[in-house]
Amino acid sequence: MDTAAEVVAAVPAGDDAGARTADLYDWQAAMAAVDGLRMYVDALDHEGQLRPNAAGQVICEHHEDWTLVRQPDAELVSCKHRELSSGAWTTIPMLVDKGGLAHLFGRWLALDEKPNVRLVTCAGLAAGLPRKLATATNLLRDEDTGRSLDAAALAAIEEITALFARELLFHRDGLPKEWQAPADAKAKTYVVLDDHIVKARRFLAQLVIEAPRPNRDVIAHAAPTMFAGPAVQKIGAPEDACSAVWEAVLQLFRARMRARGPREYGDLPVVFAASPGSDSATSEAATKGALEGRIVDLNDIDIAIRVALRNPRGYMPLSVPAQHTRLSVKMARGGCSETSIARAEQLRTAFKRYRRERDTSAPGAIAEQRNLERHLMRIADDATHIARAPTGTWGTPLWHSLTQLLNDASTAEWLDGLDDDLALGGICDLTAQCQIWFSPYFDVKAEMKRLRGERVDSRDIA
C-alpha cells in the first residue's frame, strides 16, 4: 500500500459510531413521521382531501422525542431503539431506565399529569413482568371506560403498580425530590407509600407501550408499504408512489427534529414580548416562534405528499443492483414481496450476529443452539402446513404465518428472551441452508446462475 487512498480503503476503522448515530437519528425521525402520517390519514375525507377544519401537530424534540397535539389533547412520545442482537426488554428496571419510562414519568408530572404518554420501541416485551406491565396498562384503560375488572386482574394491577413505583423511586435520576427514595433505603425492604402507588397507577392508565416497530435495519425497506401505503391508497394515488411519498414526509421530520423548519419571521428577534403593556397575543407569538421550527402540522404533510405525487422521481433513491442469495431467490420464487425479502435478509444477519455474540465454547451452548433450531423447524413446519397451496406460490402466506406463530404467547415460553424478530431471523437462516422452503423444491444454484446472467445481460444492453 503506497498511496494514501490505498491505506484509507484497506485499514479497518477504529469504530463506526458516526454511521450508527446517524442511523439512530434517522430512525427516530422516521418513527415521528409514522405518527404524523397516522394523524394525516385520520384527517382525510372520503374523497382523499384534507378536511378544512382538520387540526393536528407534531412538535419534535419538545418535552419528549416528540409531542402530538390535537386540541384539547396532547400525547408525549418517548422513542427508544434497541438492536436486534440485544433482544427484547426483559425487566421493568430496564424499561424504566433504558426504556425511558422514568423520563416520561418525570415530564408527565411536570405537565400536571395532563398529557397521555406513549413509549415507541423496535424491541418486543419479554414474557413475564414486561408483558404484565403492558397488560396492566390496557386493563387500567378498560377500567377508566367503566369496565369492571375481576379480582385476578385487580391483583395483577396492584402488583405491577407497586413494582413500577418502587423502580421509579430508586431510579432517582431526573425525578422530583418526592420521587427519590432515601439514600440509605434498600429496594427489597422499602415500603412504597400509597401516594406513590396512586400516582404510578394514574400514569400507567395513560401509558401505551407500542412494540415492536421496524428497527433501523429494515425501516427503509418496510416504511413505504407499511406507513405511506394507507395515505397513498386513501388519496387514490398509484401504489408505486409509496416510496416517493414516504421520503417526502420523512424529509419534513428530519428537518423539524433539528428545529430547522421554516419560520414566519425567520431569525428576526421577537420585540416587546416582555414589556409590561404587551398583550397576550404578543406573548403567544413569542412562544410559537420558539417552537415553530420544530412543528409539523397536517398542512405541511399534505403539501409534501402532493408535491411528491407530482414529481415522484425526485424522491426515489438511486437503484442498486439486486444481490441474489439463496434466501432471496427462494422467497422470490414463493411470491414474497421485495420488502419481505429485504427484511428477511436483515433479520438473518441480525440472528447470525446474535449467535456469534453468544459464546459457543461455553458448556451447553451447542446443545442450546440445536434445541433452538429444532423449535424453529417445528414452527416452520406448522406454518407451512397452514400456508401451503397447490399453486406453488405460498411464500407470502407462509411469511405471515411464521410471524403470527412467533408472536403467539405459547411460543414465547421457549424463546427464553429471544426477540420475535431474532427468532424469525433464525428461520431465515435455516431457509438459506435449504432446510425450509417457500415454494416447491427447485435447483437454487441454477436459478442464481440464471439471474446473475440476466443481470450481466441487462448491463450490456444499458
Image: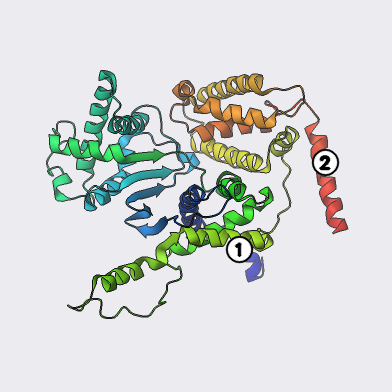
Mark 1 element type? helix
Residue at the image position 25 percent from the left and 36 percent from the top: 164
Q: Can residue 108 be seen at all in this image of the molecule?
A: yes
Residue at the image position 71 percent from the left and 54 percent from the top: 320
Q: Position of residue 361 (x, y in %)?
A: 50, 31
Vertical order, 29 against 391 (above or below)? below
Q: What amino acid is found at the position of numbered circle 2 in the picture? A: Lys
Q: Position of residue 264 (x, y in %)?
A: 42, 74
Residue 307 has which mark? 1
Q: Is residue 327 left or right of residue 191?
A: right
Q: Position of residue 98 (x, y in %)?
A: 35, 45
Task: Give neighbour class at mark 1: few <14, some 14-19, many 20+ (Cα, 10 Å).
Answer: some
Vertical order, 402 against 310 (above or below)? above
Image quadrant for the C terminus?
bottom right
Of 263 and 186, the residue lying toward us = 263
Of 448 and 318, the residue lying toward us = 318
Q: Would you identify the image quadrant in which residue 151 lies?
A: top left
Query: Disc 2 designates what residue?
Result: 449
Whichever of callouts 1 and 2 sits on the residue coming sooner in the sequence is 1
Image quadrant for the N terminus?
bottom right
Q: Is residue 207 left or right of residue 169?
A: right
Residue 93 has which mark? none
Mark 2 element type? helix
Q: Is residue 377 left or right of residue 64?
A: right
Q: Position of residue 117 (x, y in %)?
A: 33, 45
Q: Can residue 99 be seen at all in this image of the molecule?
A: no
Q: What's the coloring here?
A: rainbow
Q: What amino acid is found at the position of numbered circle 1 in the picture? A: Val
* Mark toward the viewer: 1 or 2: 1
Q: Is residue 440 left or right of residue 138?
A: right
